[in-house]
Amino acid sequence: MKLYNRGMVIAGIVAFLIAATFPLWYGRGKAVPPPDLKLDTPALERLKEKRCIESTTYMRASHMKLLAAWRDDVVREGKRTYTAADGRIHQISLTGTCLNCHSNKDKFCDRCHDYSGAKPACWSCHIIPEEVR
Amino acid sequence: MLEKALRGSRGYGIWVAFLLLLVAVGFFFYLRQLDYGLGITGMSRDVSWGLYIAQFTFLVGIAASAVMLVLPYYLHDFKAFGKITILGEFLAVSAVTMCITFVFVDLGRPDRAVNLLLYPSPRSVLFWDVIVLSGYLLLNIVTGWTVLESDKKGVPPPAWVKPLIVLSIPWAVSIHTVTAFIYSGLPGRGFWLTAIMAPRFLASAFASGPALLILLCLILRRFGRFDAGDKAIQTLAKIVTYALATSIFFVLAELFTVFYSQIPGHMHHLTYLFAGLNGHHTIARWMAVSAATAVAALVLLIIPRARKNESLLALACVGVFLSLWIEKGLGLVVTGFVPSPMETITDYTPTGPETAITIGVWALGLMLITLLYKIFVSVRNEE
Amino acid sequence: MAPTRREFLKIAGFSAVGLALPFLPSLAFDQAGTPTAGSSSPAVQGPLPALKAKRWAMTVEPRKCRPDCTDCIAACHLEHNVPDFRNPKDDIHWISLEKVEHVFPAETHPRLPESITKLPVPVLCNHCENPPCVRVCPTQATFKRADGIVMMDYHRCIGCRFCMAACPYGSRSMNWRDPRPFVRKINPAFPTRTKGVVEKCNFCEERLARGILPACVIACKDKALAFGDQEDPRSDVRLILDKCLSLRRRPELGTGPRVYYIL
């Protein structure tokens, strides 16, 4: 089989490969330090047992799924409380419950989101209580 | 076959570059719109749909009109259209692409457009419109392209295309019917709440679409080394004539019902549209142009000698296109919102950025037509 | 936002303990009613049980309105972070005051007394029994709850504005641009909206869940607004509806509005 426009085709493939692998070789050797998350808010200091509504492992991996489920529970089902695995009942509220403990959003949420390049759209509507005061 | 769109005369290159420039300008202003929000347009709380949705409505008609070529050729074996059915299908492809783009640029949250598919809502007419439009786009790409490819190879089209082409006939009717149902199914908007909305849409579509096709054929004859043939063009001209007459008749029927029954809620809209209301005359002036052009074009088209004169026919077709563009691409959508449910009159004037985006989308569609027709002509001229 | 003292008094019959509760989150009760002292999480539920109904409805008696009073609008827009753009093009409102001739064009004639034609008539979402906006929404971003409240899911709305075309009452507003800079005083307990979504009155469902009546009803010193379950014969709205002729906006459209007007 004859390859037409050999030069152009090969140049195109090379250009594509360079562009597609750009992030890999551009960031090579540069180690970005893992985010330093602060858990030293007044509300958290008062806790006897530092435990989020679910286990840390679960929260770290799946907090976004939990929040998405909460969102639908409140808005669409009118359900406003959440029963955690250990039986505790929590009010479903991003600003009222989550940010009550994690009142240092910039040193907790944002640091990890910046690190992982996640840009949740929550805060274009939901209000960070600190910012209003 | 795609490579045939890449090579062409100097004029072809300049034309495509010009369209690309318009697309780029439109895209620039679209980025501005994304940043600022739809407030960059002239739309308001009262007139919440404007130029974008109006263009969408008008172009659905252009898309549907391909059926006026496909039906006579494939169902009645009308040979004169054999040469140009693909032109109709490619026109439909470009028009539907523009429709979808216009709906997209009209979204407040385009980043969530996928919600249309994630949460399908069969009770919403818009849901069905998305389905019929994308289906129609697919049908026309597949049938047009396959038939052209067979032409190139000098073999008859594969047997499986024929059922798809036949399917595209009722499908064309469906896209404009469903689009009309978007309007005619709303309880509170007297102007749109009319059962002849869908028939009206189809009549005006079968006038404006074939009128555009005639113009495109004349352009191709002049600049594209492709002759559609007098018989095809003259038959299209007759289709335009009847469709335009029907379209005008439907509008008159609408006017009779509204003004003889004298129900104020219905009269206000049409008064605003044709005569102006409480000193708001902008739309009425456009509609006067539309009405005058439609009548003049109809006269030209009805007289056989005028219709057979190519320049007069071209003039009449420009008139038909312009008139129906004003009626559907300007008047129909805005007037549904005026007066508002609170009986206030809010004028709508498209802004500069809005107009630039609109022109950009049109340029995108024209570019698609140009490229597809270029491929078509190149293939045909090889034979 | 913690409810104000006056709001509590209006709800009636609540003790001083009840008044103090929302300000002492550490003493708040969880769902079972047992104290969760020591927990730092805020009150699991307000001091009042959620208000529930088969069909929420509102009655409006514009004759009771004081001239030039806009308390209902102010309270609603403050509660829900409704922006004030100060221009009709970008305008967003959940409740507004209109003239009788615009609210009830079919009932208007030249011999109506001035006492009627001059009345300010509060208009808001009618939370229709058969809402056209819900029917046309292509993503179910707007939907009707079991208790009749027509809700908006601002997370899902794509901003196509089909609902605005469908609403026969002009109850819906579009966020033509970012509303947040135009919210005069932000209430942190309620989200703002983003540019590109449609919004409207929600019958204060977030307050009902905390056992508090809608903001406009509480704010009205003249008791021109009443709120309750139209299926409950002892509710405030039924006490009014049962004894006089009430009007609904454009009833001929079959939408079944649940905001009733006594004129």
Image: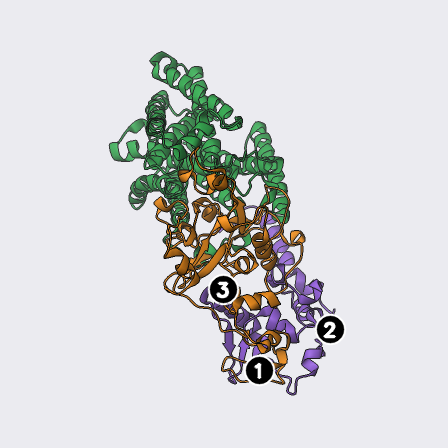
Three-letter amino acid code at the position of disc 2: Pro
In this rendered view, identify the residue nearer to me: C251 or C227. C227
Q: Please tell me whether mark 2 sits on a helix, a strand or a loop.
A: loop
Disc 1 designates what residue?
Answer: A55
The answer to whether any part of residue B216 appears in the image is no
* Residue sitting at x 49%, y 56%: C225
Tell me which chain appears orange. C
Q: Kindly state the secondary structure of the residue where label 1 is placed.
A: loop
Residue under the image location 40 percent in, 14 percent down? B309
What is the CA distance from the residue labelled 3 to the residue labelled 2? 38 Å
Q: Confirm whether residue B241 shows in the render.
A: yes
User: What residue would you read off at disc 2?
Assistant: A33
State the separation of the CA atoms marked 2 and 1.
25 Å
Name chain B's colour. green
Tell me whether circle 2 and circle 1 mark residues in contact (CB < 8 Å): no
Looking at the image, tell me whether mark 2 or mark 1 is earlier in sequence order: 2
Q: Nearer the viewer, residue A8 or B73?
A: B73
Secondary structure of residue under mark 3: helix
The amino acid beneath tag 1 is: Ser
Q: Upstream in the sequence, badge 3 or badge 2? A: 2
Residue B82 rendering spot, x and y as whole percentages: 33, 31
- Tell me the chain of label 3: A
- Which disc, if any, is residue C13? none
Q: Disc 3, disc 2: CB below 8 Å?
A: no
Q: What coloring was used for the rendering?
A: by chain
Vertical placement of C203 versus B319: above or below?
below
Residue placed under numbered mark 3 in the picture:
A75
Q: Residues within 10 Å of mark 2 (few under 14, many from 20)?
A: few
Chain displayed in purple: A
**Position of residue B57 measured from the top left corner of the image (x, y, whole percent):** 44, 38
Q: Quadrant of the C terminus of chain B?
A: top left
The amino acid pointed to by label 3 is Val
